[in-house]
Image: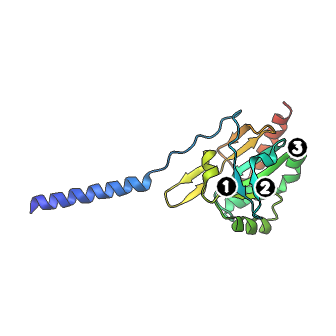
């Protein structure tokens, strides 16, 4: 009787530990591209269903920002700051593109609601975010991390922002873009 209880207890413990380890397992993630490295290519639908790829912005500076979820407070603040600074960014020769794991339909509603003048790309499976080292993957839930990449006109990563304060970020990008575009 005692050995059966001990065996049942051990089996239960091992099962619990195995399940816990499986739930906590995180797939291997690509490294964040370093400054000077070619920006990983992509092809994704925008909020209107049009296919967009990195080469669409070749010859221009690109502010490529990843964000977790449409219509959440931080993501809305960040998108609206880029909207408000869009003319300034445009005058510096830069385009803005947002990417999250939301659907194109969700992007369309978010873009219209906040009058965003730039494309939002639907990376529903998180594959592009993965290429940029910008995915949080918890088996059943994938969200893009709040990372931004400033990509130069030749398609190289000029700067990566891995710690973003949504209220100040757009201004930081403008400051860096002014400095980098002088080189």
The one of 166 and 142 positioned closer to us in this rendering: 142
Secondary structure under badge 2?
A: helix
Q: Is residue 124 left or right of residue 84?
A: left
Q: Residue furthest top?
A: 183
Where is the N terminus found, in terms of image quarters?
Answer: bottom left
Q: Is residue 126 left or right of residue 139?
A: right
* Residue that badge 1 annotates: 67
* Residue that badge 2 annotates: 81
The one of 164 and 59 positioned closer to us in this rendering: 59
Instruction: Calculate the distance from the C-alpha at mark 3 to the C-alpha at mark 2.
Output: 16 Å
Where is the C terminus found, in terms of image quarters?
Answer: top right
Vertical relation: 38 (above or below) 24: above
Q: Residues within 10 Å of mark 3 (few under 14, many from 20)?
A: some
Are the residues tagged 2 and 1 within 8 Å (C-beta)? Answer: no
Mark seen at residue 92: 3
| Residue 45 place in picture, x, y as percent | 72, 59
| Residue 31 place in picture, x, y as percent | 58, 40
Residue at (54% x, 45% y) in the render: 29
Are the residues tagged 3 and 1 within 8 Å (C-beta)? Answer: no
Residue 115 falls in image quadrant: bottom right
| Residue 12 place in picture, x, y as percent | 26, 60
Which of pointers 2 and 1 lies earlier in the amino acid sequence? Answer: 1
């Amino acid at each position: 009787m005692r050995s059966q209880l001990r065996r049942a207890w051990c089996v239960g413990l091992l099962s619990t530990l195995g399940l816990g380890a499986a739930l906590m397992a995180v797939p291997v993630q690509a490294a964040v591209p370093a400054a000077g490295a070619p920006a990983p290519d992509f092809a994704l639908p925008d909020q209107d269903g049009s296919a967009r790829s990195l080469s669409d912005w070749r010859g221009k500076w690109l502010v490529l920002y990843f964000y977790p979820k449409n219509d959440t407070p931080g993501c809305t603040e960040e998108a609206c700051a880029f909207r408000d600074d869009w003319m300034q960014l445009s005058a510096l020769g830069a385009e803005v593109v947002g990417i999250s794991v939301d659907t194109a339909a969700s992007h369309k509603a978010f873009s219209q609601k906040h009058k965003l003048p730039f494309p939002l790309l639907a990376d529903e499976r998180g594959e592009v975010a993965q290429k940029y080292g910008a995915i949080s993957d918890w088996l059943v839930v994938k969200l893009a991390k709040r990372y931004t990449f400033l990509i130069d006109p030749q398609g190289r990563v000029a700067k990566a922002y891995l710690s973003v304060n949504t209220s100040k970020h757009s201004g930081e990008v403008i400051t860096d873009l002014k400095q980098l575009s002088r080189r």
